[in-house]
Amino acid sequence: MSDPLPATLPATLPATEAVVSLAPFVVRRRVAFGDCDPAGIVYTPRYGDYIAGAFFLFLDTRFAPSFVARLGALGVVPPARRVEMDLLRPLTPGDYLDLTVTVADVGRSSYTLSAHGATLAGDAVLEAKTTMVTVSMETRRPVSVPDAFREALS
């Protein structure tokens, strides 16, 4: 049987992802070795995971503890309709990426979040947008963004 982990881990084992600022909302991510291809740069699909993680953390802060649970209680689910990503420079293992998340738009039945990614030195790494649709769990058709949700996104 192995020894249990200590209650707190040493600072030399940083988290992969953490919220570092609420205003503006910034998620810092450390690139892991396993995120990279044999050439040592981040696999393109991993950026999608980075962005989705930052967006979910952003929404969870607006709808603590879980925006998915809050929407579910309203009978709504939030599938993505559109994802845009412009990769400006590669990252390698150990690099840090700060993703600044903002609300780009709130429509009748959808909302768009955007992310600007930069290194700690401020070099632009990526620009991304994701549009999510509020869909009825019962009919699987788009419905209006619930008022409480719209208000929290404003």
Image: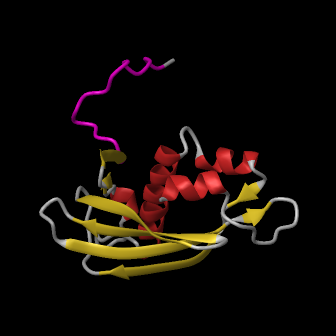
Our reading of the magenta stretch's main secondary structure is: loop
Residue 139 pos. (x, y %): 87, 66
58 shown above or below 48: above
Residue 15 on the magenta segment: yes
51 shown above or below 5: below
Residue 37 pos. (x, y %): 37, 71
4 shown above or below 28: above
Q: Report the residue at 50% width, 58% height from top.
A: 153
Residue 5 pos. (x, y %): 40, 22
Q: Which stretch did the figure color magenta?
A: 2-16
Near-viewer residue (76 or 105):
105
Question: Is 39 situated left or right of 82 in this image?
Answer: left
144 shown above or below 8: below
Q: Report the residue at 27% width, 81% height from top.
A: 88
Residue 26 on the magenta segment: no
Q: Report the residue at 75% width, 71% height from top.
A: 142
Near-viewer residue (137 or 43):
137
